[in-house]
Image (cartoon, coloured by chain):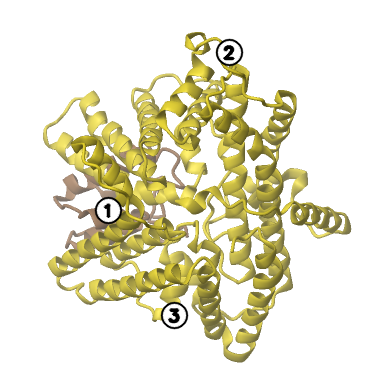
């Protein structure tokens, strides 16, 4: 499964509605418990483990993708909306 | 020197603004920012030179630690050790000043030893600037801060509008505004909007909070002196205190944001009409917002993540999973948040009340139980908030318990004739509560009123414009006169001696 699909599955939203700028403040379904589930699902899917400070530093899905790339995860999927990063 | 004093408003603020504009004229924004560091130190040193020395040491030490952590980014083990060391030093310093005597009390109770208290004064704002800098160290470890000179760091950590009681800022929020500034320091519009925000906050503090405060004091002090409470008096006192604290702290936060704006540095929002909240989670997203952000990011999320990994690894059931990822983390987070407010059992219990309420709220949603109507949600939220604040305000748990019992289970209390009733002017108290309650519930908040000139470093929510309605700020003669009157009333109301409740934390 691809990155945005994993996240969309947990949040119960369509993957195409997500982009690098998506976070708890612009996705209504994203509350503090879903936040944990999103991180856990991404960790499980890509077989990585984030440290606590890394988790504390996540501001949006773009940050999470960067973190995965820094752990040598190959993210081939490019979301159609990826360049529309919301500040 | 507090914001709502003649010295601040008529001496410090004009001189600071003049110096800021002159420094900018002579040396650009770098000069202006450096001047603000000096002004911040002068402001803070008005409490005591010793406190200022502690602040300087704290800022210098954390700046050095942050640089050390960033220098070891290629050696994660070393950076991690440095981060833990940094957090440890900060917490040890905070713990020494804030919790030594509480720990001595606990030790005495447990062992029967009679150790006496250490003579310590709590440096103003130490809980705030310590947490701001712990946040900075964590972000430094993550490579999320930009290495800057000591001057920019010092302004971020000790900027006078927020050094004493927040908002708890992140480095990126301040730093982005310190880079590449091209605009003028002397900006009349920014000054007008900033002073308006400051004026609204001043009015909230010295006119509203300080006019309802005496009713709360009468009830809490009377109960402490052994006078008895009727149901009505207990409720009037509790609600009066909730409104006093609301106007005190939101007034302070408005003043802080207004001051930040005057000096060209927008700050994050700290209040967003919390008494309009219809759930306890909603309340904490709106009350002391930067503190909630801090505790969610650095305590709740790591604890919940730990719980999630433990539950996920064992394929736990839904209930067990919720306890590990929501219930227990919420309880621990609010327990720590409670004790952060002060060293004492009342703050422990205050934290537990909110932790339990949040856990129930999260569990309710997880179980997909039907959402109650908004008015029921609001009543439940306010019941928890007002009751929690009784414990927060009361000097002892015994007193908190007896006031809460008078509120909730009056039939269990001794009949009022056993002791003289607290002498509260109930009619005036009720009228004041109704008036202030209407302001809280029916009017837009300060940032909504000023939405055309957004005052915060946070993005403006889409709802601000609609919420402001007819009260949206637009310069006109009528508005100027109204604001001048508000200012005049506020200035005339500045009394001797009252400080901000949050200065003690």
Give the secondary structure at mark 2.
Answer: helix
Residue A68: x, y in percent? 23, 58
Q: Quadrant of residue A81?
A: bottom left
Give the secondary structure at mark 1.
Answer: helix
Label 2 and label 3: CA atoms lie apart by 61 Å
In this rendering, the answer to whether B378 lies above or below B308 is above
Q: In this rendering, does residue B175 appear at all? A: no
Q: Is residue B421 left or right of residue A10?
A: right
Give the secondary structure at mark 3.
Answer: helix
Q: In this rendering, does residue B220 appear at all? A: yes
Q: Which residue is mark 3?
A: B151
- The 10 Å Cα crowd at callout 2, few under 14, some 14 to 19, many 20 or more, is some
Please tell me which residue lies in front, B307 or B97.
B97
Q: What letter labels the chain drawn in brown?
A: A
Which residue is rendered at x = 62% and y = 64% of the image?
A: B259
Q: Is disc 3 in contact with disc 1, using a CB cutoff of under 8 Å? A: no
Label 2 and label 1: CA atoms lie apart by 55 Å
Please tell me which residue lies in front, A67 or B353.
B353
In this rendering, the answer to whether B320 lies above or below B32 is above
The circle on residue B416 is: 2
Tell me which chain the residue with mark 1 is part of.
Answer: A
Which residue is rendered at x = 45% and y = 47% of the image?
A: A25
Q: Is residue B455 left or right of residue B380?
A: right
Residue B277: x, y in percent? 54, 34
What colour is chain B?
Answer: yellow
Residue B252: x, y in percent? 59, 53
Give the mark count. Answer: 3
Which residue is rendered at x = 18% and y = 59% of the image?
A: A73
Tell me which chain the residue with mark 2 is part of.
Answer: B
Q: Which residue is mark 1?
A: A55
């Amino acid at each position: 499964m691809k990155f945005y699909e994993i996240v969309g599955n947990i949040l119960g939203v369509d993957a195409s509605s997500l982009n690098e700028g998506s976070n708890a403040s612009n996705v209504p379904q994203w509350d503090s418990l879903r936040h944990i589930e999103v991180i856990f699902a991404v960790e499980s899917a890509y077989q990585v483990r984030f440290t606590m400070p890394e988790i504390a530093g996540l501001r949006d899905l773009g940050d999470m993708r960067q973190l995965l790339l820094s752990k040598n995860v190959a993210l081939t999927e490019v979301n159609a909306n990826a360049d529309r990063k919301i500040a | 020197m507090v914001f709502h004093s003649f010295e601040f408003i008529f001496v410090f603020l004009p001189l600071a603004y003049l110096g800021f504009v002159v420094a900018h004229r002579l040396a650009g924004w770098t000069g202006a920012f450096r001047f603000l560091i000096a002004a911040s130190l002068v402001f803070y040193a008005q409490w005591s030179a010793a406190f200022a020395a502690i602040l300087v040491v704290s800022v210098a030490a954390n700046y050095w630690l942050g640089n050390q952590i960033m220098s070891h980014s290629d050696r994660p083990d070393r950076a991690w050790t440095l981060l833990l060391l940094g957090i440890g030093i900060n917490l040890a310093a905070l713990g020494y000043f804030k919790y030594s005597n509480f720990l001595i009390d606990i030790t005495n109770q447990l062992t029967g030893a009679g150790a006496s208290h250490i003579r310590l004064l709590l440096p103003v704002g130490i809980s705030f600037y310590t947490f701001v800098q712990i946040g900075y160290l964590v972000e430094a470890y993550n490579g999320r801060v930009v290495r800057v000179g000591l001057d920019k760091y010092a302004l971020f950590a000790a900027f006078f509008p927020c050094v004493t009681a927040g908002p708890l800022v992140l480095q990126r929020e301040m730093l982005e505004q310190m880079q590449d500034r091209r605009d003028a320091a002397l900006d009349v519009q920014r000054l007008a909007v900033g002073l308006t925000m400051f004026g609204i906050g001043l009015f909230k503090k010295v006119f509203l909070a300080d006019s309802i405060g005496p009713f709360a004091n009468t009830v809490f002090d009377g109960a402490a002196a052994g006078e008895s409470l009727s149901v009505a008096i207990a409720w009037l006192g509790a609600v009066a205190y909730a409104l006093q604290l609301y106007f005190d702290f939101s007034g302070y936060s408005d003043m802080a944001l207004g001051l930040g704006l005057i000096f060209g540095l927008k700050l994050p929002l700290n209040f967003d009409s919390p008494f309009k909240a219809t759930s306890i989670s909603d309340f904490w997203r709106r009350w002391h917002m930067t503190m909630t952000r801090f505790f969610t990011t650095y305590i709740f999320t790591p604890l919940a993540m730990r719980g999630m990994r433990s539950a996920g690894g064992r394929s736990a059931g839904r209930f067990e999973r919720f306890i590990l990822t929501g219930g227990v983390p919420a309880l621990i987070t609010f327990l720590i948040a409670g004790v952060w407010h002060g060293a004492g059992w009342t703050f422990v219990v205050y934290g537990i009340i909110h932790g339990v309420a949040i856990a129930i709220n999260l569990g309710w949603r997880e179980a997909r139980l039907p959402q109650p109507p908004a008015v029921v949600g609001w009543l439940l939220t306010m019941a928890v908030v007002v009751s929690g604040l009784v414990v927060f305000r009361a000097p002892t748990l015994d007193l908190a318990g007896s006031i809460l019992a008078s509120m909730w289970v009056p039939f269990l209390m001794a009949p009022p004739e056993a002791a003289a009733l607290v002498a509260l002017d109930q009619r005036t108290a009720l009228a004041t509560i109704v008036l202030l309650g209407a302001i809280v519930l029916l009017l837009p908040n300060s940032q909504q009123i000023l939405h055309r000139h957004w005052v915060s470093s946070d993005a403006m929510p889409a709802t601000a414009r609609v919420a402001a309605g007819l009260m949206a700020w637009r310069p006109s003669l009528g508005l100027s006169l109204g604001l001048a009157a508000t200012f005049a009333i506020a200035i005339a109301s500045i009394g001797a001696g009252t400080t901000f409740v949050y200065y003690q934390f």
